[in-house]
Amino acid sequence: MPPVINTKLCDGCTGREYQICVEHCPFDVFKSTEIGKPPLIARPNECWYENACVMDCPKRAINLRIPLPMHIVVK
Amino acid sequence: MKEEFKTCDVLVVGGGVAGMMAAIRAAEGGAKVIVAEKANTIRSGSAMMGVDHFRSYIPEYHGDFSEFKKALGKGQDAASFATKSTEYLKTVFENSALLVKKWEEWGIPIKYHGKYHFAGHTFPGDDPKMGGWLKISGMNIKPVLTEQSLNRSVEIVNRVMVFDLLKNKDNKVVGAMALHTRENIMVIFEANAVILSTGCVTGLYPNPTRAGYFNTCYPFLHSGDGRIMAYRAGAELADLELTRRHAGPKYLIKAGQASWVGVLRDREGNTVGPFLDKPDARYGDMTVEVNKEIFEEYRNQGKGPIYMDMSGITDKDYEEMLHYLSNQSGTAFLEHFKQTGVNLRNAAVEFTTFEHAVSNGIQFNHRGETGVNGLYAAGDESRGGLGLAATIGWKTGEHVAESVRSISSPGISGAESLIDDSIRLVKDIRTREVGACWQEAYAVLQQITNDYCGSVRSQSILEAGLDFLEKMKIRTRDTLKANDAHELMYCMQALNLMDLAELLFVAALDRKETRALHKRPDYPLTNPLLTGKKHIIKQKNGTPVTEWRNV
C-alpha cells in the first residue's frame, strides 16, 4: 500500500474546503471521506511515487512505502 | 451517462506547463478560456512535482545570440532541436528571458545563491552557461501557474479526459468530447479554437516492473491522446518511429537523469565514459547523453552493471545535487534512500535504460498552428522540454486569442454522428457484464509494441505485429469493460494508444533505414539522404499515408 497515512497526525483537513491529498493526487489513489476524517487509499497500485501527497500534506501525515520491486539498486 | 455542454473561445486540452502558459496568455488577450485537465492542474503534467531547468537565453548572461545558437544542439536534445525550424527556435529563445523573469515575479524561485545558475548537460571544456540549461527551483511551478490562470479568469475543469475532437461540416475543429474521471458525465466542449497540450506518451511500451505498478519515466496518465486526436482531425505527425529511451535509477523509474552529479562507473570502479573522473555539477556525466542504451548494452555484453557513483563529490556539489533532485520530482528518491539507510554522498546507484517512448508527434509551428483550421498544439505534443513548452505555449495562447477575437461561435453542427458513436462506445464499455479490464488492454498493447516494434524491427516482424495489433484493437474495443468512471478513463486511454501504435508500426515499416533507436536489421545503414528530413504521417481517406519532407 504505497501512501501510508499516519492517522495520529492526519486531521482529515479540518477547516479546509477539501482533503488536499485526495484532490492533489494526479492518479486518484485516494478516496474522499468526510472532512475531518482520514481519506481512504482506494487504488494503492496506481501510485506513481511522485510524492505529491507527501509534500502537500499540511500535517506531514503521509509517507510512501515504495513497493519491494521498485527499490533502488545501490552498490 | 449524463451530458454537459460547455462553451468557450479557446479550449486548452491538458493543463501542464504549455497548456497553462497558453491559457494565461490567451486570457490576457481577452479570450474566454477553459483548461480541460485529466488530473488537477495543481499537480499535473510532466512538471507535476517539479522540473529543475528552463532552457533559456538570457541576453545579459549570454551575449550575442549567434554565439549562443552555436552551442545548442549538443547532448540529448541534439536530435529534437535538429527537427525544429529556425523560426521556432528563434521564438523560443527570444521569449525565454521574458518568461523566466515573469516566473520569478510569480513566485517560482529561479536564482541559486542569488544568481542565475547554468549547469549540467554540458561536455567538459564547454561553458555550461552556453547550453542554456538554466537551473530553477521548480517544485511549485504547477500551483503557481494554476494561481496565475485563475487570476486571469481562466476556467479550469479538472478530472476530465478529452478523448476526441469535434469538427463541423466545414472541417474546422469546433470543440472536443471528454469524460469525467470520477462521475458518469460526458462533457461536450464547444470552442472556436482548441490547443492540444497533452504532453508526452506513456504506456505504449512495457515498464521494467512487470507486476502491474505505475513505474514509468513520465506520469502514467500521459497517453498521447493529443497526437491521435490531432491525426484523426487531419493534422500531420512526424517521426513517431524515432522512439526515445531515457535512463536513470534502477528500479524506481523517473526522468531527470541530469540532476544526478556522479560519474558512471562499472562494478570494479572503472569509468565508463571519457568525460569525467570525479563528480562535477557544472557538467554531469555526458556519457549518458551520448548513449542512453549504454546500460543495456553493457549488461548484454556481460560488462554491466553501471553505477552513477557519487563518491568524491564536493560538499558544494552535493548540496546542489540534493537541491535540484528535490526540484526535479526527486523527493521520493531522497526519502527512499533515507528509509533504506543509504548515504547518497558516497553511494553508487545502479542506472538502467528505460522503456522506449514515442516522443515526436504533432507538427506545429512557432505559433502553435497545425495546419488544421481551429487546431493548435504546444509543448511535448512534439518533444521540447520545459523551456520550449513554456515559450511556445505562451506564444500560441497569444496568437490564438488574436485569431478567435473576430469569430462568432461556429457551433458543433456536423459533429453529431461522432458524438453519437462515442456515446455508444462508452455505454458498451460501461454496461458489459463480462469483459476485459483496462489493464488487459495495456498488457496486450505493450507486448505487441515491445515484441514487434521494440529494439529490433524488420519488415516481416513489423508486418506480423501490425496485423496482430489491428486484430487485437478490434477485439479490445469489443471486449473492454469499465466498472466506474476512473476505469473508463484508462479504457479510453488504451484505445487511443492502440490507434497511435498502429501509426507507429506504419511509420516504422516505411523508414527503411537504421537511425538511432530505430534498428532495422534488414536495412542496417543510416541513409544520409534522409538526414534533415521529417517523416510525416497523416490521414488520407481514412488510412495513414507517409511522406518525407525537408525540415
Image (cartoon, coloured by chain):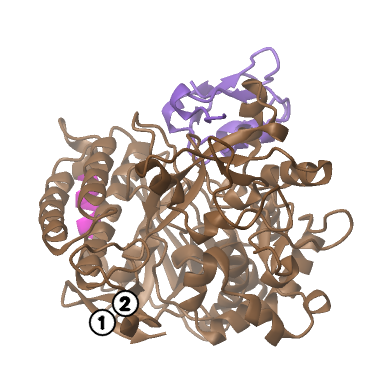
What residue appears at the point 16 percent right and 34 percent down from the top-left corner? B435
Q: In this view, does B392 lie above or below B242?
A: below
Relative to B24, is B543 on the left or the right?
left
Magenta-drawn stretch, dominant element (helix, strand or loop): helix
Q: In which quarter of the image is the C terminus of chain B?
A: bottom left
Circle 1 residues within 10 Å: few <14, some 14–19, many ≥20: few
Q: How far apart are marks 1 and 2 (CA)?
A: 6 Å
Q: Is B456 one of the magenta-colored residues? A: no
Chain depicted in purple: A
Q: In which quarter of the image is residue A5?
A: top right
Q: Quadrant of residue B357?
A: bottom left
First in sequence, mark 1 or 2: give its number: 2
Residue most toward the right? B114
Q: What element carries label 2?
A: strand
- The magenta segment is B420-427
Q: Is B426 one of the magenta-colored residues? A: yes
Chain depicted in brown: B
Whole-percent x and y of residue B238? 35, 73
> Disc 1 designates what residue?
B547
> Looking at the picture, which amino acid does disc 2 mark?
His
Q: In which quarter of the image is the N terminus of chain B?
A: top left
